[in-house]
């Protein structure tokens, strides 16, 4: 494909890649791998709450999309390391920036949620 994608077109392959990269677990995995390569178990501990099945599916999708590199070492027991590709690093930096913004602005965001909830409670 030599043309630019359009994530707003439901037929464009960019939509599926965006779904993978911006999924609940996809964003967390990409941002965590920005700190360096990790083994599966390490990544599972770092991304608290993800099941083995969801982590495996997420990593497989991100690998297929060219964002994550999977390296199998021929040792016993088998060792598999996951790291970001150059494309993965680019998107992970953007996701990390978003996460930093959210963390920096958390008090204002929580205050907005509370104000919204209070308004909704008044209208019940």
Image (cartoon, rainbow, N blue to C red):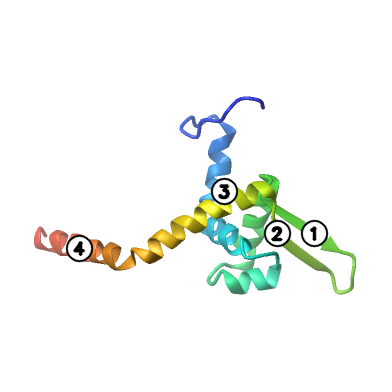
Q: In the image, which disc is placed on residue 20? A: 3
**Label 2's element?**
strand
Residue on which the image places disc 2:
83
In the rendered image, residue 17, in percent from the top left (x then y), is placed at 58, 42
Quick check: marks 1 and 2 in contact, CB under 8 Å? yes
Q: Residue at x 84, y 69 (%)?
A: 78
Judge the density around disc 3: few (<14), some (14-19), many (≥20) Cα neighbours within 10 Å: many
Q: CA distance from mark 3 to mark 1?
A: 20 Å
Judge the density around disc 4: few (<14), some (14-19), many (≥20) Cα neighbours within 10 Å: few
Question: Mark 2 or 4, which is nearer the eye?
Answer: 2
**Label 3's element?**
helix
Relative side of 27 to 117, left or right: right
The numbered mark, 2 or 3, whose residue comes first in the sequence reads 3
Q: CA distance from mark 2 to mark 4?
A: 41 Å
The numbered mark, 3 or 4, whose residue comes first in the sequence reads 3
- Whether residue 104 appears in this view of the structure is yes
Relative side of 121 to 100, left or right: left
Q: CA distance from mark 2 to mark 3?
A: 16 Å
The numbered mark, 1 or 2, whose residue comes first in the sequence reads 1
In the rendered image, residue 45, in percent from the top left (x then y), is placed at 61, 74
Residue on which the image places disc 1:
71
């Amino acid at each position: 494909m030599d043309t630019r994608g359009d994530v707003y077109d439901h037929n464009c392959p960019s939509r599926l890649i965006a779904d993978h990269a911006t999924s609940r677990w996809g964003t967390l995995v990409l941002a965590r791998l920005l700190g360096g390569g990790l083994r599966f178990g390490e990544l599972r501990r770092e991304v608290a709450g993800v099941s083995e099945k969801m982590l495996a599916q997420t990593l497989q999708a991100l690998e297929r999309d060219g964002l994550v590199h999977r390296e199998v070492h021929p040792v016993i027991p088998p060792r598999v390391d996951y790291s970001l590709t150059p494309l993965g690093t680019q998107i992970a930096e953007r996701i990390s920036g978003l996460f930093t913004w959210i963390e920096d602005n958390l008090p204002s965001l929580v205050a907005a949620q509370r104000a919204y909830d209070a308004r909704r409670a008044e209208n019940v």
